[in-house]
Structure formats: structure tokens, C-alpha cells
Amino acid sequence: MPKQTFFNLPAEKRKRVIDAAKEVFYHTSYEEASINQVIKLAGIPRGSFYQYFDDKADLYGFLCHRIAFRLLKQLKDAVWKADYDLFQASRTILPVWLKEIFYGKDAEFFYRMMDAMSRRQMPHAHRQADKELLSPEETKQAAEKLAIPEADVKYLVQELFMTYVSVISAGVKSYEAGEKVDLGQLDQLLNRRIGYLEHGFKKAG
């Protein structure tokens, strides 16, 4: 994460550095992106960069964190509105994320991030979540709502996440084939697989 000196910068200069980083990482693979590209676009000395960030991985992680923080807030809002029914919350928020990943303002970055993960090119520290998606209190509320043990809530969250990843992978295949990503088809696939988790294969089928 950035050093305090970065947060002490005037808002305009912080934005300039962030915009430069987004320009580089959104249009260049992680391994090809360089600090020189960022500082040139941001118009800052190389020494100043190291007063703000430890290295390229630190800057990349900061961009990932900004996006993850926004998505996590959306998730928590959806869980709360669904009265902690994780299946209902997933059906609400995950299609929104699909649209954002493939057609949102950060779509190019998402694709490059997924590509880097598949080729194990991302910094190790940013390949895994820093903490649980649900707080202990949220986990407790979900367990009561679904009438399952709290330990199983954590398992369910993992399975829902992996289900979502499998649907994203289907979209990426279309993207890589030069085809238009059909969000309607992905939504149907997502709902079917969430149904398998909620009701079992026999009932869902």
C-alpha cells in the first residue's frame, strides 16, 4: 500500500499519479509495465515515486485494492439488503459484477489481471484476498438466516466465489475468441450453478 507521503499529496497530484498508473496497467501487461512509464505520464521524478510506493508491485496492489474495496462494499450492501441470504445476494450482485468486468470502465484492467493470474505473473501478495469477505458478525447472521453452521457459511462463500470464477472463465473464452461476451448467457449459467449450490443438482436440474 502507498506510504503516508502519497496520501499527504494534494488531491490533484494524487489523481495524476493514479491516472498514470491506470493508463499503464490498463493497457500493458504487468510484466511489461514499468515504473518509468508511470513517472513519465505522471510527470514526477523517479525519486518521488519511491517516496510514495515501494515498487511496481506496491503500486499495482494499490490499484487492485481500490477496485476490490468498491466491489466488497457492493457485496456487503447486497448481503444486507437480502437479509443475509447469500444465495439471493449472489443473484443480485454477481450479474452486476459480470457487466462491470466485461463492459465497465475497468474492463481492460480486469482482463489483464485475469490473464496475469492464469499465467502466474501477478505479484504473489495480490493473488489472494487479504481477509475474509464476511465479518464474523455477518457470518453469524448468514448462518442464522440459512440455518447452517458458521463454518459452513465460510465454505459456501468459497463455493459461490469459485462458481463466479467459472462463469467469468466462460466469458473470457468468448473474449479471447474475438466474440462478443453475451451477458444474458452468462447470467443464465450463473443462476443455474447457484441453483446447484442452493438446491442440489437433482432438484436444480
Image: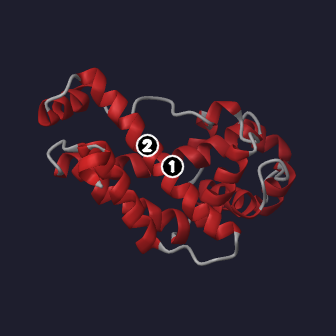
Left or right relative to 137: residue 15: right
Q: CA distance from mark 1 to mark 2?
A: 6 Å
How far across and how far down the image is residue 13, in percent?
Answer: 64, 57
Q: Classify the position of the N terminus by image quarter.
A: top right
Q: Secondary structure at mark 1?
A: helix
Residue at the spot 28% in from the left edge and 43% down from the top edge: 200
Q: Which residue is mark 2?
A: 161
How far across and how far down the image is residue 125, in percent?
Answer: 65, 30
Q: Residues within 10 Å of mark 2 (few under 14, many from 20)?
A: few
Count of labels in the image: 2
How far across and how far down the image is residue 114, in percent?
Answer: 64, 51
Can residue 14 be seen here? Answer: yes
Amino acid type at image mark 2: Phe
Within the image, what quadrant is residue 178 found in?
bottom right
Within the image, what quadrant is residue 93 found in?
bottom left
Reply above or below: 85 against 135. Answer: below
Residue at the spot 43% in from the left edge and 60% down from the top edge: 97
Residue toward you, 130 or 42: 130
Residue at the spot 64% in from the left edge and 59% down from the top edge: 111
How far across and how far down the image is residue 49, in percent?
Answer: 76, 43
Residue at the spot 70% in from the left edge and 71% down from the top edge: 177
Q: Which residue is mark 1?
A: 165
Can residue 78 be seen here? Answer: no
Q: Residues within 10 Å of mark 1 (few under 14, many from 20)?
A: some
Give the label on residue 121, or none.
none
Left or right relative to 189: residue 173: right
Q: Classify the position of the C terminus by image quarter.
A: bottom left
Mark 1 in CB contact with mark 2 (< 8 angstroms) = yes
Amino acid type at image mark 1: Val
